Image: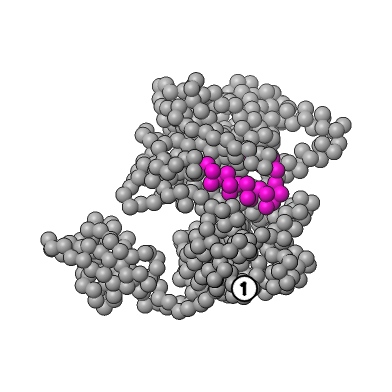
């Protein structure tokens, strides 16, 4: 999701140094002196592991604190995978109550060489069904490959996270390695926020897009055509980099397959600032990967290059921008790049609009939703769905106010330009201020009403000509009529059938066994669900409308008569 701004600040400092060449040499030497040099060597014996050394200058007061990997993304005690901790140039102790800390005493400013070994958290290749396999945050180090996130393997000196750093990898001959630690101008933050994939069978492609490398590294067999995936991701990247006027960007995608479970689609990953780590089932549809990667690539700019995120707990209050506007531009760039047809664009929006409309938290204020962000899946999705609709609303108002001369794109680019000279203004604040100052659109009342009362955001109905029709209708919530989770836990023996509900009326009863589903389009309540069930040894086919008792109003898009014409595609794609 979020990444920090350290990379951006680092680039600005580099630019300033170039303007003052006299200072650059001094800055360069000082930077080298302060740099933390990591070396990582894979070894297969006695068990697969990574031997890591850090070379650095100890603190001037003669005491240097080293923090080992500990907690991250719900994982705890990550230091337990570290062993053989040793120091040259000082003596080391572990404070009693802080097992993730090492205190090194040395002569003031002494050069130190710290070494340790990281063992694998996995004794077999992660395969879906194993606990944690769909998001292997702990280091995967196998005899012929490894995939590690910086948070799980790198020990850091306490202090400035923007301290310069360098990482060198030593891997067996014949292996391929891809890491975003290979990107230029690293600091400690980048080292922690890194992903590395290496192995004998890692396949790496590199494309130059708008003057910068886009690399894709894959481990494991994928059913889809990898060349097609590379083409799609390259097209997405090209569209996005051109839109933002960004040349020389670096981006890495690592993709590891985790087998499959019949009927389950698992595609997920972790954003790494200038990279994205994907873990996916091997039969993942290309559409899921395209959408995931388009979203993650947009995060290069949103939010960090258009405004600042609030620190600490308040960060979640701005997720409607950082995730919602990112989804808006995910859809736009997939259409603009030609990856999506206008039909697919409309279908994606309809899913988003339905999810938002059907959310039991639709009227939850942004303030409350942010506070409860980690407590429910539905609250986590709200900033994405509601935020995307808020972006669409704002886009519609800018187009209407400017008579079609401007749209949200112009506002985004204006924000990016401001961010270069003032990186401190909060992204939501800048969005509202610039909308008013530069485009005469008062966005603040909607933002405020959503923030304090959970007011409805609406997709703009007008201004689409013959390109798009936007309707609104009452509909029932999607409900299968029985308790799906309990039924799954129960070995597919039906549980929690709602008495008197549509499934019940079709004949479904607790205790029947589900053989398979043969019809339905979850979460669409208008398409009947059809199941083959085993009723005490007799197979029967039951079918019903998956409607729950709750009704709500939902917006829906439909391509207009000219919807697929080039001028309409251009309008929908914001061009
Ligand atoms: Zn995101």
Where in the figure is residue 37, as x and y percent of width and height? 64, 27
Task: Please tell me how crowded label 1 is: few (under 14), some (14-19), or many (20+) other residues with Cα within 10 Å.
Answer: few
What is the magenta range? 230-250
Counting from the top left corner in percent of width and height, residue 83 is at 48, 28
Name the secondary structure under disc 1: loop
Q: Quadrant of residue 190?
A: top right
Residue 275, compared with residue 359, is above or below; it is above
Q: Nearer the viewer, residue 61 or 29?
A: 29
235 in magenta: yes
Residue at position x 68%, y 49% in the image: 242
Dominant secondary-structure state across the stretch colored magenta: helix
User: Would residue 200 be counted in the magenta stretch?
Assistant: no
The image shows residue 271, relative to residue 430, as above or below, that is above
Q: Position of residue 22 (x, y in %)?
A: 87, 31
Residue 407 visible to an observer of this rendering: yes
Residue that numbered label 1 is attached to: 465
| Quarter of the image that includes the C terminus | bottom right
Q: Is residue 447 visible?
A: no
Residue at 33% in and 65% down: 520
Q: Is residue 152 left or right of residue 302?
A: left
């Amino acid at each position: 999701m979020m990444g920090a701004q350290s990379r951006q600040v680092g680039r600005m400092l580099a630019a300033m140094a170039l303007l003052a060449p006299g200072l650059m040499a001094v800055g360069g030497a000082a930077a080298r002196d302060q740099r933390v040099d990591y070396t990582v060597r894979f070894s297969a014996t006695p068990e697969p592991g990574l031997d890591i050394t850090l070379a650095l200058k100890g603190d001037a007061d003669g005491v240097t604190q080293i923090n080992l990997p500990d907690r991250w993304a719900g994982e705890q005690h990550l230091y337990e995978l570290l062993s053989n901790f040793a120091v040259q140039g000082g003596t080391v102790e572990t404070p009693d109550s802080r097992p993730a800390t090492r205190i090194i005493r040395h002569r003031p400013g002494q050069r130190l060489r710290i070494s340790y070994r990281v063992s694998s958290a996995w004794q077999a290749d992660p395969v879906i069904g194993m606990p944690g396999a769909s998001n292997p945050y702990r280091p995967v180090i196998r005899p012929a490959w490894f995939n590690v996130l910086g948070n799980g393997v790198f020990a850091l000196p306490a202090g400035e996270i923007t301290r310069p750093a360098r990482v060198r990898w030593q891997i067996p001959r014949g292996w391929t390695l891809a890491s975003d630690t290979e990107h230029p101008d690293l600091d400690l933050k980048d080292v922690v926020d890194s992903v590395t994939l290496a192995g004998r069978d890692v396949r790496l492609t590199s494309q130059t897009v708008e003057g910068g490398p886009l690399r894709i590294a894959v481990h494991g067999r994928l059913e889809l055509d990898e060349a097609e995936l590379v083409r799609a991701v390259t097209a997405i990247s090209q569209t996005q980099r051109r839109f933002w006027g960004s040349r020389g960007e670096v981006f890495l995608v690592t993709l590891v397959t985790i087998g499959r479970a019949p009927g389950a689609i698992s595609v997920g990953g972790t954003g790494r600032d200038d990279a994205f780590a994907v873990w996916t089932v091997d039969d993942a549809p290309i559409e899921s990967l395209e959408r995931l990667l388009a979203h993650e690539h947009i995060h290069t700019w949103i939010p960090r290059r258009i405004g600042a995120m609030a620190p600490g707990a308040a960060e979640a209050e701005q997720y409607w921008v950082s995730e919602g506007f990112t989804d808006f531009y995910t859809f736009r760039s997939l259409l603009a790049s030609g990856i999506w047809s206008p039909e697919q664009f409309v279908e994606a929006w309809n899913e988003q609009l339905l999810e938002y409309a059907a959310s039991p938290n639709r009227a939850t204020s942004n303030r409350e939703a942010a506070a409860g962000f980690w407590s429910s899946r539905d609250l986590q999705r709200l900033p994405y769905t509601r935020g995307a609709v808020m972006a669409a609303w704002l886009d519609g108002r800018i187009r209407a106010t400017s008579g079609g001369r401007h749209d949200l794109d112009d506002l985004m680019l204006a924000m990016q330009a401001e961010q270069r000279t003032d990186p401190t203004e909060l992204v939501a604040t800048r969005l509202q201020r610039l909308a008013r100052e530069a485009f005469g659109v008062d966005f603040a009342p909607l933002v405020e009403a959503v923030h304090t009362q959970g007011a409805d955001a609406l997709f703009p109905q007008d201004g689409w000509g013959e390109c798009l029709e936007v309707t609104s209708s009452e509909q029932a919530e999607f409900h299968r009529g029985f308790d799906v989770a309990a039924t799954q836990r129960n070995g597919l023996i039906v549980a929690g059938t709602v008495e008197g509900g549509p499934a019940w009326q079709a004949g479904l009863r607790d205790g029947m066994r589900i053989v398979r589903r043969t019809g339905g389009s979850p979460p669409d309540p208008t398409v009947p669900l059809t199941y083959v069930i085993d009723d005490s040894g007799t197979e029967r086919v039951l079918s019903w409308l998956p409607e729950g008792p709750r009704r709500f109003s939902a917006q829906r898009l439909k391509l207009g008569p000219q919807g697929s014409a080039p001028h309409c595609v251009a309008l929908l794609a914001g061009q």
